[in-house]
Image (spheres, rainbow, N blue to C red):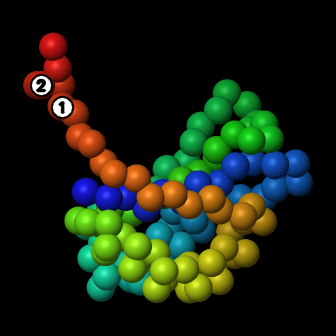
Amino acid sequence: MIKVIALYRWREGATFNHDYYHGEHMRIARAALQPLGLVRLESDRVLYPGEPRPGQVVALTNAFFSDLQQAQTAAKETAAVLMADVPNYTNIAPESYLAQLNEHSLANAG
């Protein structure tokens, strides 16, 4: 399983509308990515005790795909539509990464 990770690091003067991001932007992302092999889509709001400091991640998304080829194709083919929506919820430029998911269960621990 491969995941495409998009994350947002706080900076001075940043704004971020979590309601829009976790609602409307995820709807747009799901609609764009599903035809390209999306298996699962998650979005997280990172919580801190107080206001975020510069460099701290405030939100992230994990989009899961069966293999690397699907993930790369989906990322390439949907980049324009997803990036066009970014100004609707933040002025932070997202960072993106591909990662291989290695699952570990507690049943196998020990």
In the rendered image, the quadrant that contains the N terminus is: bottom left
Classify mark 1: helix, strand or loop: loop
Examine the rendered structure and indicate whether residue 80 appears above or below residue 12.
Answer: below
Tell me which residue sits at (54%, 53%) in the image.
60
Residue 26 pos. (x, y %): 47, 70
Residue 53 pos. (x, y %): 78, 37
How would you rate the neighbour count of disc 1 (Cα within 10 Å): few for under 14, some for 14-19, many for 20 or more? Answer: few
Mark number for residue 105? 1
Q: Amino acid at mark 2?
A: Asn
Q: 44 or 9, which is in the foreground? A: 9
Mark number for residue 108? 2
Is there a contact, CB below 8 Å, between mark 1 and mark 2? yes
> Which quadrant of the view contains residue 3?
bottom left
Residue 9 falls left or right of residue 37: right
Q: 44 or 75, which is in the foreground? A: 75
In the rendered image, the quadrant that contains the C terminus is: top left
The answer to whether residue 35 of the structure is visible from this angle is yes
